Image (cartoon, grey):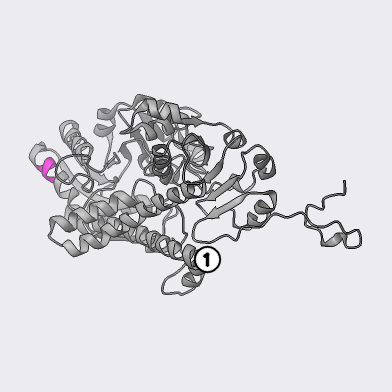
Amino acid sequence: MVEVKRICCIGAGYVGGPTCSVIAQMCPEVTVTVVDVNEDRIRAWNSENLPIFEPGLQEVVESCRGINLFFSTDIDKAIQDADLIFISVNTPTKTFGIGKGRAADLKYIEACARRIADVSSGHKIVVEKSTVPVRAAESIRRIFNANTKSSLNFQGTAISDLMNPDRVLIGGDETPEGQRAIEALHRIYEHWVPKSKIITTNTWSSELSKLAANAFLAQRISSINSISALCEVTGADVEEVAHAIGTDQRIGSRFLKASVGFGGSCFQKDVLNLVYLCEALNLCEVARYWQQVIEINDYQRKRFSSRIIGCLFNTVTDKKIALLGFAFKKDTGDTRESSSIYISRYLMDEGARLHIYDPKVKKEQIVQDLSYGDDPSRVSRLVTISTDPHDACEDAHAIVICTEWDMFKELDYKRIYDAMLKPAFIFDGRRILDSLHEQLQYIGFQVETIGKRVKQRVSFTPKKDTTTPDHHPASKRTKQ
């Protein structure tokens, strides 16, 4: 039986850092070391200002940091000391060469595998924790087999999990060594995950399951977003349609929320990996099917942006637009593939002046995201990062809500309206203001949202009638 006492995680990003912090908290007898070449990131993990925001993460880290959880740049020592090694590095989509725009770039995975093989001795369990395409484990194994010293014994597994998971999926070889590696990882997760929720498969099935799961979730979002476009031209409400669909037990209600499109590090990348895999295996019809999920997502972003431009009298040139929310979803500072990036770029292409506010995304991250592949001088000219949502909206022509932060439901919209240019527009890209539509319209806003044709309230001044004061609108204007 393989007993895991020391864990090394290579990569202190959005996957490695939080996952290994949870493992350290749940397994106090195991020493967990998270390593990274980025000194600033490791310094942040060792400070009070973590580089990543996730609800509850600060408390988890502080409960075990310096006890059995450590963050370091000494990668070689952590590898040498470890019984189990997680590879949790970035696997971006390739930007050039064969598979450009679809295939995953495995250069960081390969670099980790070579480094592990170079500095290790003794038995190691190596775990793919990054999002990887099918057959990535085979590539890692080939590197190990070609570079391993005679004293080494490597075994690769693949895993997908959450802190409170519906299931934990562990894949490994169907050899005695592979089964022992699966059992060792199984025992780690048994500390807080019921055995019935831990699924074991062969390596290839686990890798494909990860891609397929994310592809199915992305497909559901694109499906309801396609229906949202139909709702806007027919007079239906996509929220009502989604509710009706979701009550069908065969379908369920999860991931049926229409919005400006899905984002995050996994959905688009995994669907594109699946498309590339199908193309490489000459499954052209299957590839086209999954490619359409991405195209609908792009269409939704462009459609929303075009709607903003159309409502603002077909031009946003030199107009101030307040963009509220830049993270790809609420309760995170993660901006990877955020729809806010794409919408910002579409509006910048039309000459809009954007004032962006997000409660958890740092200014440097927003500027970096918008400057990637763009002229930095254009970004500095057209983009202002605000530290207060009310300031972002002052003198704006429109407000665009791109992230469903709860705080955006509680803003002082009367104050905001009074400080905006008229007519003042709100574009709710996340359907978080549905309960406020009547109030917002009475204030004076022109309200536009996803998947619903909002009936615009016609402003009027009621006749003075002292005999029926209760029939006046809610503002109850007094006589002059």
Q: Is residue 292 at least partly visible in the picture?
A: yes
Rendered residue at 44%/27% (across/down): 381
Which quarter of the figure has residue 21? top left
The residues colored magenta run: 141-145
Left/right of residue 329 with respect to residue 223 in the rendered view: right
Total numbered labels: 1
Is residue 408 depicted above or below 469 in this figure?
A: above
Left/right of residue 439 with respect to residue 259 in the rendered view: right
- Which residue bears the numbered disc 1? 237
Is residue 406 depicted above or below 470 in this figure?
A: above
Residue 3 spot, x, y in % from top left = 29, 46
- Tell me the crowding category of disc 1: few under 14, some 14 to 19, or many 20 or more residues within 10 angstroms, Cα based: some
Q: Is residue 382 magenta?
A: no
Residue 434 spot, x, y in % from top left = 59, 57
Kind of residue indicated by mark 1: Asp
Dominant secondary structure, magenta:
helix
Which quarter of the figure has residue 29? top left
Left/right of residue 141 with respect to residue 75 in the rendered view: left
Q: Is residue 24 at least partly visible in the picture?
A: no
Q: Is residue 144 magenta?
A: yes
Residue in the foreground of this view, choosing between 431 and 167: 431
Helix, strand or loop under label 1: loop
Residue in the foreground of this view, choosing between 328 and 163: 328
Is residue 37 depicted above or below 91 in this figure?
A: above
